Amino acid sequence: MNELPRRLEPITRQALDDFRVVAVTGPRQAGKTTLVRRVLGGSGTFARLDRVATLQAALTDPDGFAAFGETPRAFDEVQRAGDPLIRAIKHVVDDDPSRGQFLLNGSADFLTVPTISESLAGRAVFLELWPFTQGELHQTPDGFIEAAFSDHNRLLEGGASPLGTSDYLERACAGGFPEAVFLSPPARHTWFRDYLRTVIQRDIKDLSSARRTQDLPKLLRLLAARTAGELVMKNLHEDAGFGSSHTTEAYLGYLQMTYLVLLLPAWSRNLTSKAARRPKVHITDSGLAAHLLGKSPQALARPTDPARGQIVESFAVNEMHRQASWHRGVVTLHHFRDRGGLEIDVVAEAADGRLVAVEIKSGPTVDRSDARHLRWLRDKAPEDFVCGVVLHTGGRAYRLDDRILALPISRLWTAS
């Protein structure tokens, strides 16, 4: 099932026609190596830098390594060879401006890796591959972002969703990692445990100056407990118990660097002087979040479980974030909250300033009161407001108000 088509594949192929260097980054085990092999299709040169002999060759003679072989030259886990290889790649493409020379991939955002200073600015395009979307898993269009901005009335099409609350909880706890999503719950628990050990003890340790990597699992669990919540660094630092707040901030950065944590920035156009500035934190895979919190679909089915709303919100936000990452236009995701109690889970903003606002509910029923903050934003920014959506775990899609809809969460991946 790892060979399921990925939305990023045609985008990567096009990028090789347009740029000298294409870099595909994302979480470990998201399917980057499989994607690169599919794009190469037997052509070019493929080198895995997670193999000792290959890495040693790249470290010993980075200039010769970068210039060897047919193009595109694909370097897997390129961050392991550090600055010398990145600089060698820069020299090659500066001497020869041909398109499609390098296809790099790595399990770290090497623009933020402390040991890499060269950014390949002006020479490379950076793409992100995340775990499977629900649309990739089930071969549906993944068209919510596109439809919401182009013709939101299309979101009402398609009839009732066959999914109910328990189905969404099952999917949220499975997550989207290609190896983990098809495993039984006990096997998935083992997979996530070993996955975190590899990322923390190998990737972060090798790529950073972190001296207390043994403390990172605790920090990640604290962030999982806050998933879908506003991140208050002072409280996180106190709970983590690190000696310095700078250490807490640095270690949070390492978790972002390896794509385990997503910070959703606060959105504001000075619509209210009381707007909050803190980001919301999301674990980047809801299955990983459920693992860190020790939650099963059965546990989350209890209406009183406080993690239920968090897991469902992070599940939906991750779906939107993945769609936004390969949307043909620039769409950025934010959240909104002010000290007066106004709160919107997601504010998606297009490059031209148009807005789509989303509230996420973990229950099956919606009424007009659930859209009151969406109506507020519509009335505050009437020209830019395209539509507002209340996502829920029920089956029906219907109109709540002018430009405001109630939709099953499944519309995120079934809309076309």
Image (tube, rainbow, N blue to C red):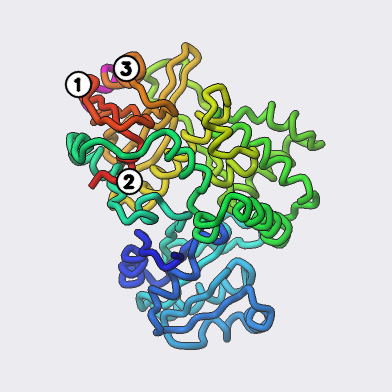
Secondary element under disc 2, as helix, strand or loop, is helix
* Residue underneath mark 2: 413
Nearer the observer, 396 or 256: 396
322 lies above or below 361: below
Q: Is residue 323 magenta?
A: no
On screen, residue 226 versus residue 350, left or right, reads right
Does the rendering let one see residue 270?
yes
Q: Between disc 1 and disc 2, whose residue precedes?
A: 1
- Label 3: few (<14), some or many (≥20) within 10 Å? few
Secondary element under disc 1, as helix, strand or loop, is loop
Mark closer to the observer (3, 1)? 3
* Residue underneath mark 3: 367
Q: Residue at x 60, y 38 (%)?
A: 295
- Label 2: few (<14), some or many (≥20) within 10 Å? many
Specify start and end residues of the magenta stretch as a single range: 379-383
Q: Between disc 3 and disc 1, whose residue precedes?
A: 3
146 lies above or below 198: above
Measuring from the top left, give residue 285's x and y in whole percent.
Answer: 52, 46
* Residue underneath mark 1: 402
Q: Residue at x 42, y 79 (%)?
A: 72
Label 3 – label 2 distance at C-alpha = 23 Å
Does the rendering let one see residue 284?
no
- Amino acid marked by disc 2: Trp
Label 1 – label 2 distance at C-alpha = 23 Å
